[in-house]
Each structure stands twice: as C-alpha cells, then as structure tokens.
Amino acid sequence: MIGYAENSKKYGHTDVGFIIIGDRRTPEKANQRVADTLENHGFSAQYWSVNKQEEWLTEFPKLAEIIPWNSDCRRNLGYLIAYQQGAEIIITIDDDNFVTNEDYFTKHSIVGTTQTLLTISSTNKWFNPCSLLQTNPLRNIYPRGFPYNRRQNNDLLWGYSTGKVALNMGLWLGHPDVDAITNLNESVGITRFNSEQVMLAQGTFAPINTQNTAFHRSVLPAYYYIPMGARIYGMTLDRFGDIWAGLFVKKIIDQVNDRVAIGEPLTYHKRNPHDLMKDLRFEIWGILITEHLVPAVESMIIDGKTYPDAYMDLAEKLFHLDCYPDKVASKYFCKISQGMKTWVNICDRL
C-alpha cells in the first residue's frame, strides 16, 4: 500500500483514497499502522477492523451471510464502502502485487472513459492475456481460470474499435497468475509487456482476476466476488471466486454495451508462499466446473439493459442452469445465485 501512495504522490494524484479490509486472521495493529502511514503521506486511508465491519453490517444482515470471514471474498465489503463513499473508480489489489515506476493511477483512469483501442475478437470466444507478456523461459502459458477446452483451435482477429471502458485489468511482471498445474510443470517469470493496451470485443472473454483490476462504480451491482469453500467429494472448492466473478461481469458488460481493457498498469507480482499441491486440490473442481459453466454462460440470452437488471437476470438463469458436473455443484450455484440477487439489492440500497 505504501508504494502505491508514494507512486500517487510522485505523479500528483491527490484524489486517491485507500480502504483496508481486515479479517479475523489479520493483525489489526499492523493494518492500522499501514493506514496511519498512508495518512501521513497525505491520503485518505481507512482501516476497517472486524468490529467496525460488524457494526456496519448490522444494517445489512443478509449481506453478512454472503461475505464469509477468513476469505479473499472479504474484499466485497471494501467495494461497497468505496461505492457508498462516492468513488468513481474502484481498484482492487492483492497484497503480493507491488507498484512499478509507471504512473499507476493514470493507467487505470481510462475506466469510465471512451477509448479507441486495439481490439481482439476470438473465433472460440476466448483470448489469452498472457500472450501479451514476455516469459522467461520462453513458454506458452495461460492465466488461472482459462478454460482448458478453449486452449486450441483459436484464431484471433485484430482491429481498432471505440467503446466506453467499464473495467481495466492490469497485468504483471514477475510471477504470472497461472494455475497450479502450470506452476507444477515449470517455474516461469514475466519480464515485460509486449503490447499496447487492448480491448476485448463483445462476445470475447478472458479470465479476469482481482490482483490489479479497476472498474467503474456503475459496474459494481454486477461484480460480486463469488464465495468459495464448497465441499465436493471431500475436496474444497477455492481459487475461482474472482474468475467466476470476472466471467459473469464480462457477460454483463457486453450486455450493457461497455468494454473491458487489458494490459497496463503493470504490477510486480512477488507471489506469497504457496503449497502448490494444496492449490491443485483447491482448483480441481473449479477447473471441472468451468469447463461446463463457460459454454453455458457464453450462450445465455440476457434480459436487461442496466447492470443491476442484467445481473439479476443472469443470477436467475444460473439458478435454473442444468450444466453442472455434480449435484453438489448444482446446489452450490443455487446458493450463489441467491447471493448475487442479494448483492444487487444491497447496491440498490447504497
């Protein structure tokens, strides 16, 4: 966080604020010190302790049920607080992503503006953002959440188009955000960004994570970080909360006729220590479900021309969807569907 504040100060951004969402496993004193340091740099900084969150949530008891503790899903609360306080652009950052020397906030400030950008359309409806990056060693990799059944038979069409950017996903140097299968196969690093900023054509998807992503406030009713933790045949489902949230929001952004951009700003991803075998166990059911979920979402006909209306219709269609590879997964998505509807209602109240 301190690096982002210093970067903002260096480039003259005075209208940037920081929100730190604590959790039951995080050291409160350390988080408060970070918030105090940010304020000493001249920025608005709020640390939301467990007690402060619980007090705020007393007005939204249904919300408390769909944002679990001890989960990266907790960032949902930060989105809502920023939204309530009037933020036009909301940026979500993972704690192992560090700012580089470029003007970080200016790069993300394309969100909410109309841009003419290099635009990618894919014959199999998916684009690989890692193809924009230089790897060391040279290797073809895909980001975490990229469907395995979309990794072949893919031709890309390139051109320029104009549209309003509703969401911008920055990429990374250092460790790429790839799945456990890729990490177990061979270690790989990212040395540079090989492209200009790109925009996804309507109907073309890419995995959207929450490491370094900015979105406009209008998008929030359609951008609920999906809770994980379902148990399927003794295995815990995890590490797909941001990926499925990204799949759903891209569907709705297309419906509203806005756009998703990918590329800069870059962060340096110095990945926290991971047990790769544990990651693999968490990801297995996410990978299997994604293979069924993706074509179903691609083919959905969504009703509604606003973010809340379209997302509510998507939630209803997910509830009745009959594509999941297991009955437990089907039951889980019925619960997620109800959470998505609650999310829209909470955003409406705020």
Image (cartoon, rainbow, N blue to C red):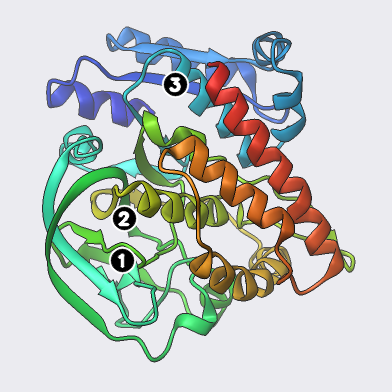
Q: Residue 57: x, y in percent?
A: 69, 15
Crowdedness near tag 2: few (<14), some (14–19) or many (≥20) residues, C-alpha within 10 Å: many
Residue contact between numbered discs 1 and 2, judged by CB atoms under 8 Å: yes
Q: Marks 3 and 1, how far apart in space? A: 33 Å
Q: Amino acid at mark 3?
A: Tyr
Query: Which badge, 1 or 2, is on the more N-terminal residue?
Result: 2
Query: Which badge, 3 or 1, is on the more N-terminal residue?
Result: 3
Which residue extends farthest front? 303
Q: Amino acid at mark 1?
A: Ile
Q: Nearer the viewer, mark 3 or mark 1?
A: 3
**Residue located beneath label 3 in the image:** 83
Give the quarter of the image for residue 6: top left
**Residue located beneath label 2 in the image:** 171
Give the quarter of the image for residue 230: bottom right
Which disc number belongs to residue 190? 1
Q: Amino acid at mark 2?
A: Leu
Is label 1 in a helix, a strand or a loop? strand
101 lies above or below 117: above
Is label 3 in a helix, a strand or a loop? helix
Residue 91 visible (yes or no)? no
Query: Which badge, 3 or 2, is on the more N-terminal residue?
Result: 3
- From the viewer's side, name the closer residue of 305 and 104: 305
Residue contact between numbered discs 3 and 1, judged by CB atoms under 8 Å: no
Is label 2 in a helix, a strand or a loop? strand
Q: Residue 31: x, y in percent?
A: 54, 20
189 lies above or below 164: below
- From the viewer's side, name the closer residue of 233 and 84: 84
Q: Residue at x 21, y 63 (%)?
A: 192
Q: Marks 3 and 2, how far apart in space? A: 24 Å
Residue 174 visible (yes or no)? yes
